[in-house]
């Protein structure tokens, strides 16, 4: 994320809220180019010996860490005493769940509609997984709900699953409107937080966590040659992709 560096939010450490923020791969030509130019202050050294495919998880991981920090700040009890539901086991959702586990959360349920992905995540990460199409998460049960999909359907599920006084962190950006039962949220004092990306410190902390093994073996990351990139995007679009993250390698 490239920010102006001089506004109140940038100077206050909340770079992600800079109104002039720019993001490589979103507003700027993306990282699939052979060469890209970015400000030097954006560079973070990768620790010696760290696999590139693992370092590449820093960005989605930092999004999860940032979401967990926001939940932590608004929760009445420590996260480690909380029951957490994570909706969506893409890279952001899965890394959010792994970060929660690293923070001592023992009761974590992950909701994912793609059966191939459920199987892979179960195999590598040992979370309790549910298919939200077949089975609703327990109603009014979770202290923290992380919506890493961000659609009307998942927002509705998040409100139903959140216990009174609980926190919903909305990370995904699938669609804009619908799903929130505001009356229920008001009567049950549910805190709803929008979470957008990360700060530079979130990125640095996440890189260290990934490198130290705090987020597990990361065996769920799939590596393919760059030449198979188009096929990988096609699988992702059609929901046929098991891996929460595919890293394309040039060699
Ligand atoms: Zn700014």
Image (spheres, rainbow, N blue to C red):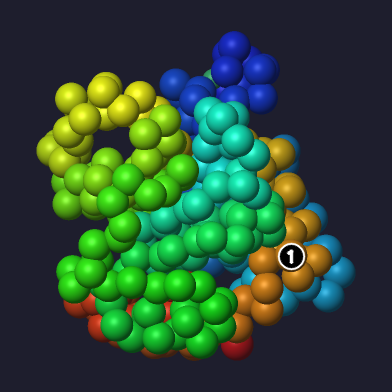
Q: Residue at x 33, y 85 (%)?
A: 116
Q: Hey, which quadrant is residue 138 in on the image?
A: bottom left
Kindly identify the residue that appears in the image at 83 percent across and 75 percent down: 49
Q: Is residue 50 left or right of residue 4?
A: right
Between 40 and 246, the one nearer to me in the picture: 246
- The spot of residue 71 in percent (x, y) is 53, 37
Picture layout, residue 14 above or below residue 90: above
93 left or right of 38 in image: left
Q: In this rendering, is residue 183 above or below 29?
A: above
Give the residue at mark 1: 214
**Residue closer to the observer: 188 or 206:** 188
Q: Residue reaching furthest left? A: 178
- What is the x, y in percent for residue 178? 13, 38
Point out the image quarter for the N terminus. Answer: top right
Residue lying at the far right in this picture: please name it.
48
Which residue corresponds to the image point at 60% horizontal and 61% vertical from the top-left?
106
Report the image quarter containing ligand 1. Answer: top right
Q: Where does the image place residue 186, in percent across and percent down from the top left?
A: 27, 22
């Amino acid at each position: 994320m490239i920010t102006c560096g001089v506004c109140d939010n940038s100077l206050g450490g909340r770079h992600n809220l800079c109104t002039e923020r720019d993001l490589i791969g979103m507003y700027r030509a993306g990282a699939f180019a052979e060469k890209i130019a970015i400000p030097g202050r954006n560079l973070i050294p990768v620790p010696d010996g760290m696999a590139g495919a693992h370092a590449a998880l820093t960005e989605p991981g930092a999004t999860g860490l940032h979401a967990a920090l926001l939940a932590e700040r608004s929760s009445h009890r420590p996260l480690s005493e909380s029951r957490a539901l994570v909706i969506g086991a893409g890279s952001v959702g899965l890394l959010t769940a792994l970060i929660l586990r690293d923070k001592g959360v023992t009761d974590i349920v992950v909701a994912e509609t793609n059966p191939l992905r459920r199987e892979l995540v179960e195999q590598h990460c040992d979370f309790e997984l549910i298919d939200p199409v077949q089975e609703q998460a327990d109603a009014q049960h979770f202290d923290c709900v992380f919506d890493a999909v961000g659609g009307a359907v998942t927002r509705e599920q998040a409100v139903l699953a959140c216990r009174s006084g609980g926190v919903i962190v909305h990370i995904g950006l699938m669609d804009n409107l619908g799903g929130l039962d505001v009356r229920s949220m008001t009567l049950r004092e549910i805190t709803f937080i929008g979470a957008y990306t990360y700060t530079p410190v979130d990125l640095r902390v996440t890189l260290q966590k990934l490198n130290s093994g705090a987020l597990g073996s990361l065996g769920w990351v799939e590596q393919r040659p760059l030449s198979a990139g188009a096929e990988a995007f096609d699988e992702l679009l059609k929901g046929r992709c098991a891996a929460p993250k595919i890293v394309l390698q040039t060699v």
